[in-house]
Image (spheres, rainbow, N blue to C red):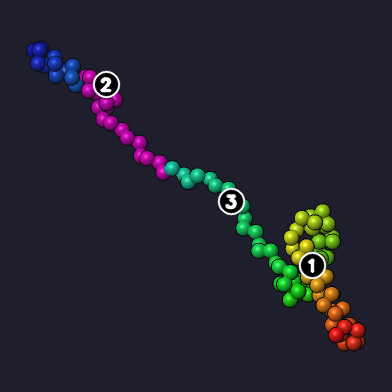
Amino acid sequence: MTSLERLTVAVLMAASAGLGATGAVYLRPLQPTPPPVVATAPVPAPIRAVTWFKAHPDEIRQKLAACNDNPGVGMHDPECFNAQEASNKLSFDRQIDEGRREGMIK
């Protein structure tokens, strides 16, 4: 074997050792990166105002019944406060109207 042949064999052996036994380079396909998991809280329902409850007396009764049934939760619910305030204002308005009709209030 000539020195050129030996050199060629040595280069081929080195190249095949670096490229793998088959002499080919294998690239694995890129896997798509999964999106990050982000925990989102559900969007709370808007809080109904006192004026809304005053316009819906049946809803006042339903809300106050639910609030009174579970006062531990109801005491932290802004709608319970709003429903109670609307109930108080409607009661006050009825008393004023009744006093005006009876001539006690001008």
Question: Which tag, 1 or 3, sits closer to the chain's start?
Answer: 3
Where is 10 relative to 19, above or below?
above
From what the image shows, is residue 93 above or below residue 14? below
Q: In the image, which residues are magenta?
A: 13-32
N-term-proximal mark, 2 vs 3? 2
Disc 2/disc 3 C-alpha distance (Å)? 52 Å
| Residue 2, percent from left and from top | 8, 12
Residue found 91% across the figure and 87% down from its top: 102
Q: Which mark is residue 17?
A: 2
Residue 3 visible, this orientation: yes
Q: Nearer the viewer, residue 88 or 70?
A: 88
Q: Quadrant of residue 22?
A: top left
* Residue at numbered disc 3: 40
For the residue carrying disc 2, how many other residues have a C-alpha within 10 Å: few (<14), some (14-19), or many (20+)? Answer: few
Residue 24 appears at what percent x and percent y?
A: 26, 30
Q: Amino acid at mark 1?
A: Glu
**Which label is found at residue 85?**
1
Q: Please tell me whether residue 65 is drawn above or below residue 4 in the rendered image.
A: below
The quarter of the image holding the N terminus is top left
Q: Nearer the viewer, residue 47 or 12?
A: 47
- Mark 2 or 3, closer to the camera: 3
Whole-percent x and y of residue 42? 62, 55
User: Was residue 98 drawn as part of the magenta stretch in this picture?
Assistant: no
Label 1, label 2: how far apart the Cα atoms are: 84 Å
